[in-house]
Amino acid sequence: MESAEIGALLDEALQLCQAGALTQAEQIYRQVLAADAAVPDAWNMLALVLYQRGELAAAAEAAERATLLRPQIPPYWLTRGNIAQARHGTREAQSCFNRAIELDPGFAEAHFRLALSYDREERIPDAIMTYRNALRYAPDVAEIHYQLAEALMVEARWVEAMHAYEAAFTRDQNAELDRRGCINCMNYLQFESVPEFWHTEITRFFARNDIDHIHYAKVVLRIFMTKGAFRAVLDAAQRPDARFEPDASALGAVMRDELLRILLRDALVIDAGLELVLTRLRAALLLDAELRAQAPPDFLCALALQCFNNEFIFAESQAESAAADRLLREVDAELQPERNLPDTLLRPLAVLAMYRPLHAVRGADRLAARRPGPAALGQLLRSSVLNVLTERTLRQDITVIGAITDDVSRAVRDMYEEHPYPRWFSLDRWPPLAFADWLGSRVPIPNAPAEFPAAPRILVAGCGTGKDPICFATDIAGAQVLGVDLSLSSLAYAQRMANELGLTNIEFRQGNILDLGVLTERFDMICATGVLHHLHDPVDGLRVLLQLLRPGGLLKIGLYSERARASVNAARAMIRQQQLPATAAAIREFRQQVFDLQQDTPVRPLLNFSDFYSMSMCRDLLFHVQEHQFQLPQIAAILHDHGLTVLGLSDLLPHAVTAYRQMFPGDDGMNNFAHWDAFEARHPETFAGMYHIWCCVPKHAAA
Ligand SMILES: C[S@@+](CC[C@H](N)C(=O)[O-])C[C@H]1O[C@@H](n2cnc3c(N)ncnc32)[C@H](O)[C@@H]1O
């Protein structure tokens, strides 16, 4: 074959590759190589095609042929390195990238791939240095800045990380890079003002519907406090005068704030200061007709949604109760659900919805079904009326595994029937990953076993309102998920959320963990987070779950830490002493006592628990009918007695991981419970959420 003909064929094949016609391109490369096996470009391109198709062994062979034929060509070494990396040949990959760099020190992509390889090996300082080398030659590549930022985050170098994120996002015209790590980074930064660039980025980010708004709410709240208008309104709210009279322009700015509206609509206000502002503002909107007439309707609907989201947890005075009852009668008399809502009724309806559930208002169902404008009202009606009605229907179709018979389980069920947990509204959506990759990167568990089925069966025992099982069903490719819980209200909430996401790989059934021995299925992973400690004897529940795990399967349990719940226990003592019942009124009253306490009292750290800020979750936190708490040595003994191998702990904050590594530099697996116990003694707030523990049953030991 003439070299001109080869050149033309290679050009044609390249175009086919670019158009995604890999099979045809491969045929051409093979045709060229059959005619002349010494064309290195054809080997290199063939390697790339095979690599894209996942035929890694053949790709590696082809790439090697190219480098043997012409060892002086840097891109051939890049191809070979990328393929070696994909085959987990880290050493070979790094030596190929280094060879490419020796041949061409300005080869940015080779630097970048080398840095990624170091990153994967957790050689973070090397990765950081190498990303910086890559940027010397390709300063405008957003992806490199981004990976550098993520590596800096791992090293807790927050300020540098933010600079790298900014460099990345400025160059990311189509907003393709994930902003989540960056927003998390802001939790660790001190800032007194927010530059316009970041304000715009965060507002755009927070308006997305594929993120868990509650997760990012703390950053948003801190941003509010950098704004003069917010601080002015907060000052006014903190003044003990009977009247709440903030500066009108500051109040107007607050009510028009886009970020605040999203927070109110899609999340929970997890902040004592902002709660005070909103509580006082709500009262003013109810009692002051002039202020109500001036308030933007979108803001009124957003605040009403927040009150629905937190189940009317804000303090309510007697004067407000009486005025809300009057307003209910007025709305009731004027609402004509078959007609468009008159403008004169929009604001009263929204203010009423700040105090009373709209689904209980006569005709609200018909009004909601017609989805009247404006959009903010539509969303309020959908959430507070239609969703509630949908859940009532869905609960009737949930399969029941068996009657709940023991006293503790019945008491626990009754509590969660009234107050399902958790109250969640949105989810961080990620592209699905194979089970092993998900465990390695999303959880991550350093010691996870290597063998995983392609379509894992997952049981979530005590799944509550379904956040965990829905995350598994969306995040893990091929997963088949079963969620079981005592509470039909919780399961109906879960089913509605699953339906909204269009999930078909998830099922919910009502049942008691203690009775799950009747199931014939066996699971690759079982998850019971925040559940076993509500059983009469948590170990009884653990035994049942272990029978359902396949040999070699994974178990994830979440258990309360006694140390981390010191403030909860102090609060419980107050509640017992005052004999407060678990009613909405008593929960509101108790919360006010906590707000009024001095900063340094043992109960005040409760304000840091996000569960403190909604009715259901506050009841779960402080008024539970049944709760055990643990210390790590005790858990270690239980797991050991049941033949479980501890893999590690998850859901740790980055600064806890960094501090642990400094305290125990040799403990790479970070799964030594004696070490963690010593660490927790020094940092008692580490497991404020709970201990999230991953273990596995050795293959031979499972039932
Ligand atoms: C605090 S919530 C945790 C929900 C969920 N696992 C989460 O982490 O978001 C506890 C849940 O466990 C359920 N639960 C408690 N005891 C149970 C039992 N014996 N069998 C089944 N579910 C149980 C409750 O109904 C409740 O929904």
Image: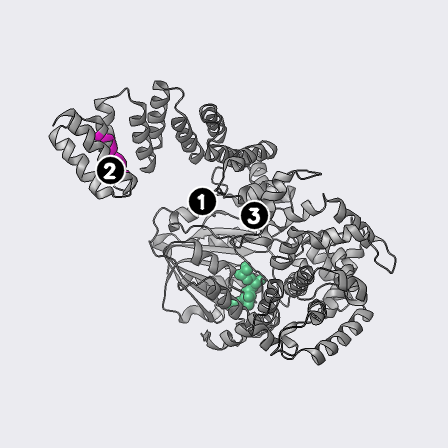
Could you tell whether 504 is left or right of 124 in the image? left
How many numbered marks does the figure carry?
A: 3
C-beta proximity under 8 Å, tags 3 and 1: no
Amino acid of disc 2 = Ala
Is 46 included in the stretch rendered in magenta?
yes
Dominant SS type (magenta): helix
Could you tell whether 261 is left or right of 247 in the image? left
Pinpoint residue 576: horizontal percent, then vertical percent.
74, 66
Question: Of circles 3 and 1, which is in front?
Answer: 3
The answer, for residue 334, to whether it is visible in the render is yes
Specify which label sits upstream in the sequence, 2 or 3: 2
Q: What stretch is highlighted in magenta?
A: 42-51
Between the C-alphas of marks 2 and 3, the distance is 41 Å
- Cβ of mark 2 under 8 Å from ligand 1: the answer is no
Foreground: 252 or 677?
Answer: 252
Q: Is mark 1 on a helix, strand or loop?
A: helix
Counting other residues with Cα less than 10 Å from the Cα at mark 2, is it few (<14), some (14-19), or many (20 or more)?
some
Q: Which residue is drawn at 33% across and 53% down?
A: 454
Foreground: 62 or 376?
Answer: 376
Amino acid of disc 3 = Phe
Q: Quadrant of the C terminus?
A: bottom left
The residue pinned by badge 1 equals 441
Q: Which mark is residue 57?
A: 2
Pinpoint residue 341: horizontal percent, then vertical percent.
65, 73
The residue pinned by badge 3 equals 205
Rendered view: 363 above or below 563:
below
Amino acid of disc 1 = Ser
Between the C-alphas of marks 1 and 2, the distance is 25 Å
